[in-house]
Image (cartoon, helix red, strand yellow):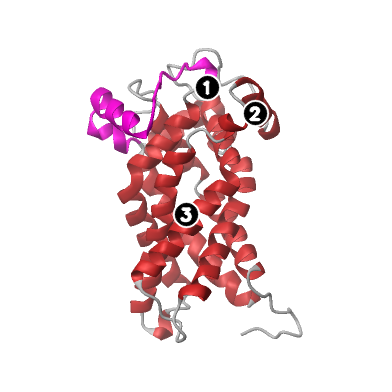
Amino acid sequence: MKDSTFWPSVPEPALSLVCGGIAGALSRTTVSPMERVKVLQQVQGSTNSYRHGTLRSIHQIWQEEGYKGLYRGNGINCVRVVPYSAVQYSVFQALKSALADSDGSWSIPRRLFAGTVAGFMSVLATYPMDLVKTRLSVQTAALQNLKHRTSKEAPPGMWASMLNIYRTEGGIKALYRGLIPTSLGVAPYTALNFTIYGKLKDLVPERARNNPSTALVLGAISGGVGQTLIYPMDVLRRRFQVATLGGGEMGFQYKSTPDALVQIVQREGYVGLYKGWGANMWKICPSMAVQWMSYDLIRRVLE
């Protein structure tokens, strides 16, 4: 417990908003190169422009776009992830206060429900920025089915991209293209992530619970397990987000989420549903490890 005369305590929900926002930005920046590789592998379809694994794909991006290419879209990702993580953690903590028993315990179904609601609310609050972040990650890549743009051309900025999507692709509806598969992926992932982390932490001896290494290990486990279980929905999320990029040059014409699943399996096999999974594990395990450790540390400093 800190000295409140030196640093005043921060009450809820501001505490969760601040801790979640900072932790989210730190974790995403840490793994930005892996995030970009994952997105490119997810949306490349059958072209296999980035087919040589995570590390060789990172090297390929470095050669084609320089080191800045490894962080393409990270600026807007941080702008997005601060409110995204802040909403997620604050909603979860608010529901925990409402649903937990008087002794602080609460059942797995209630944890899952709180995580699902928190995940959906965070997506709804920040989805247009997630859409633009994905577009920026893809636009300068050497994907064979993107012929109108080269990696030498500077991509538009965040607000210019949003305005262009709004004007040319269908208004507000276009800014939320892919919201359903995204929600179907993020909501259960958030539920699993929070629940697995919380239950594993309950199993740790009390003297070790506040150790940063504990949060690192448990965060990596909860993130890895959660993402693996819902990963096909994350692939759909990215496919829908770039479907109209370049006038449809990506070649994805999906009528609905079930239709997209069927088309991917027919054209790319079941492995198509897990494209980029390896890069995602390189990303999600350290990302969630850093995020949970940062969240716990910052929370202990501020509360």
Q: Nearer the viewer, mark 3 or mark 1?
A: 1
Query: Mark 1: which secondary structure?
Result: helix
Which residue in the structure is indicated by mark 3?
Answer: 287
Which residue in the structure is indicated by mark 1?
Answer: 245
Which residue in the structure is indicated by mark 2?
Answer: 161
As rendered, which of 170 and 273 lies closer to the eye? 170
Query: Residues in magenta?
Result: 246-275
Query: Mark 2: which secondary structure?
Result: helix
Query: Label 2 neighbourhood size at 10 Å, few (<14), some (14-19), many (20+)?
Result: some
Separation of marks 2 and 1 at Cα, in angstroms: 11 Å
Query: Label 3 neighbourhood size at 10 Å, few (<14), some (14-19), many (20+)?
Result: many
Residue 74 is one of the magenta-drawn residues: no
Q: Which of marks 2 and 3 is in front?
A: 2
Q: Is residue 93 visible?
A: yes
Residue 274 is one of the magenta-drawn residues: yes
Instruction: Determine the residue located farthest toward the top in the rendered image.
Output: 147
Query: The C terminus lies in which quarter of the figure?
Result: bottom right
Which quarter of the figure has residue 56? top left
Q: Residue at x 56, y 16 (%)?
A: 149
Q: Image check: 78 left or right of 31? A: right
- Amino acid type indicated by mark 3: Ser
What is the x, y in percent for residue 215?
Answer: 44, 69
- Amino acid type indicated by mark 2: Ser
Q: Taking 119 as reference, is 49 above or below it?
A: above
What is the x, y in percent for residue 229?
Answer: 30, 50
What is the x, y in percent for residue 24?
Answer: 56, 56
